[in-house]
Amino acid sequence: MTGTGRYGEHVFRPEDAGEADRIDLAALAYDDTTFARLRRLGAGPGWRCLDVGAGTGTVARRLLREAGVSEVVAVDRDVRFLEAHTTPGLTVRQADVTADGFSPGGFDLVHARFVLMHLPSPERMISRLGGLLVPGGVLVISDAVDLTTATASDTPYTLAMRAMWRGLRDTIGTDVSGVTRYPGLFRAAGLGSVAAEIHVPPLLPGSPVSRFWVETWDRARAAMIATGLVDGPAIDAAVRYLDSPRCADIAPGMLTAWGRRQE
């Protein structure tokens, strides 16, 4: 990921066993939706693309393999997972996109998923990433939106999610409260044809998104307990609940916003 350093050092460390697998669970849950949107926005032959916070590179490789784009520059602060899966047309770059010197050129597509929610100034990043577009290029940003846990009935799942969001905010600065403002921030950055959508995968026993949250709770366990909202047995109960037919809760949605640089 990108950012001030706290994200990778305190909770979701790339060097921890299983971290690539956790990231790939999110890819299994969200990649089809992401890729379908990028294709509908025109990603295809001749396009030069930037994938910010590219993780294990699943979106970048699909753009090359299935959309036939000319090049994808995949950027992350730690690139070990990207370097493990090189492919023709993929340029891997280790960089911090928040740094003033970050200037990789112009792109037809700039994409970032589950990145800006961890950074202190999403409005600044939207403006900066929009500035990397060539005329007619499209910026696509996806982040989590917490749809129900603040108001839903108490279940093992909602208790764990409330503790997770607060624990991540307290430790690494994650904040999803402003994600629904992204379309307005796109317009403020001078982009046109702005729109947004939300995808909510179902929480089914053993599904990739359910397993992703279990793995995320495991890494965020100390931060969650520190909030005082849950203890260890409560987290364990939430894990069992997600793997049972009793779970009828709604997962966090993925809001995707997009806009084009004017010709």
Image (tube, rainbow, N blue to C red):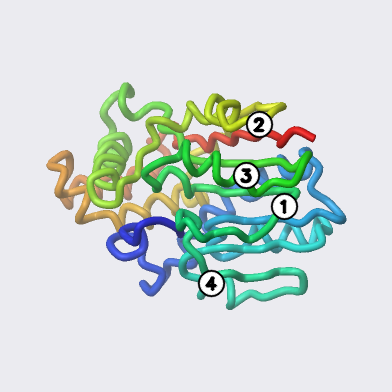
Q: Quadrant of residue 12?
A: bottom left
Q: Work out whether residue 73 or residue 167 is closer to the camera in this orientation and state it.
A: 73
Q: Which residue is mark 1?
A: 107
Label pair 2/1, CB-CB below 8 angstroms: no
Q: What amino acid is found at the position of numbered circle 2 in the picture?
A: Leu
Question: Of helix, strand and loop, which one carries label 1?
Answer: strand
Which quadrant: the C terminus?
Answer: top right
Q: Work out whether residue 180 or residue 163 is closer to the camera in this orientation and state it.
A: 180
Q: Which residue is mark 4?
A: 81
Q: What amino acid is found at the position of numbered circle 1 in the picture?
A: Phe
Badge 3: few (under 14), some or many (20 or more) residues near its Cα, within 10 Å?
A: many
Q: Earlier in the sequence, mark 3 or mark 4?
A: 4
Can I make out residue 249 in this image? no
Q: Quadrant of residue 135?
A: top right
Q: Which residue is mark 2?
A: 191
187 up-or-down from 233: above or below: above
Q: Earlier in the sequence, mark 2 or mark 3?
A: 3
The alpha-carbon separation of the residues under discs 4 and 1 comes to 23 Å
